[in-house]
Image (cartoon, rainbow, N blue to C red):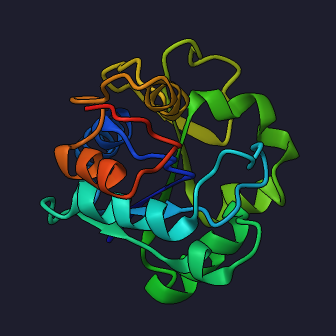
Amino acid sequence: MRIGILGGTFNPIHIGHLILAEEARFKLRLDKLILVPAFMPPHKNTSDVIDAKDRLEMVRLAIEDNPAFEISTYEVDSKKKSYSIDTLKEFRKIYGDDAQLCFITGSDSLKDLFSWKNINDIFKISKFIVANRPGYPLKDIPKEADTVVITPIEVSSEDIRKRLKEGRSIRYLVSEKVRKYILEHNLYRLPNAS
């Protein structure tokens, strides 16, 4: 079994995440792809990261109509800083040694890669896949990693949060269910955007 693992803060999850997940699933011939929202990401400023339960629910809403996608609450349930090595070890326990774990990250992560906790163990436990992200070319790829080229979509969670704070529309940048959830729960200090 080939299992894709895509972690992230998903603050909020947007169409760029979903396109990456679907294209990676198809191009890597994955049996399923598991999205893993972080409880507290170790490499990000967490001052504007909303509560994990809201991010988890938005991921659930965004993927519920895709039977090849699953959500893992492992990192959120741990209630501590989320390290990829710990998550991969957990998935290895769940799926056994016969499963091929494909850990997918964006090319924007490459700049910090060798500061990750136990990065060499991550390379051993999983097939490490780097996907292109706009503004971050696929270069200086570690020899242990493979790449997957996806349709570049210039959407970022940071831009979505900024739009919401400014009262601008985020329609079509996130799935409609996620957009409604953000509005109904007044997330990201939302004035009255549509």
Instruction: From the viewer's side, name the closer residue of 79 and 193.
Output: 193
Please state the horizontal and vertical placement of residue 149, each as a whole percent of the image.
38, 25
Q: Is residue 101 visible?
A: no
Q: Judge from the rendering whether residue 10 lies leftward or rightward of residue 155; answer left or right.
A: right
Question: In this rendering, is residue 91 above or below 16?
Answer: below
Query: Which quadrant of the view contains residue 114?
Result: top right
In the displayed orientation, state which residue is furthest to the front: 192
Location of the C terminus by quadrant is: top left
Residue that appears at 69% across and 79% down: 79
Question: In this rendering, is residue 177 above or below 167?
Answer: below
Instruction: From the viewer's side, name the closer residue of 177 and 191.
Output: 191
Residue that appears at 31% across and 69% down: 70
Residue that appears at 64% across and 16% down: 139
Please state the horizontal and vertical placement of residue 99, each as a whole percent of the image.
42, 74
Query: Which quadrant of the view contains residue 113?
Result: top right
Please state the horizontal and vertical placement of residue 184, each as a whole percent of the image.
30, 56
Instruction: From the viewer's side, name the closer residue of 62 and 94.
Output: 62
Question: In this rendering, is residue 114 above or below 40?
Answer: above
Location of the N terminus by quadrant is: bottom left
Q: Judge from the rendering whether residue 24 lies leftward or rightward of residue 7; answer left or right.
A: left
Numbered marks: total: 0
In the displayed orientation, state which residue is furthest to the right: 115
Please state the horizontal and vertical placement of residue 150, each as a whole percent of the image.
34, 26
Q: Is residue 190 visible?
A: yes
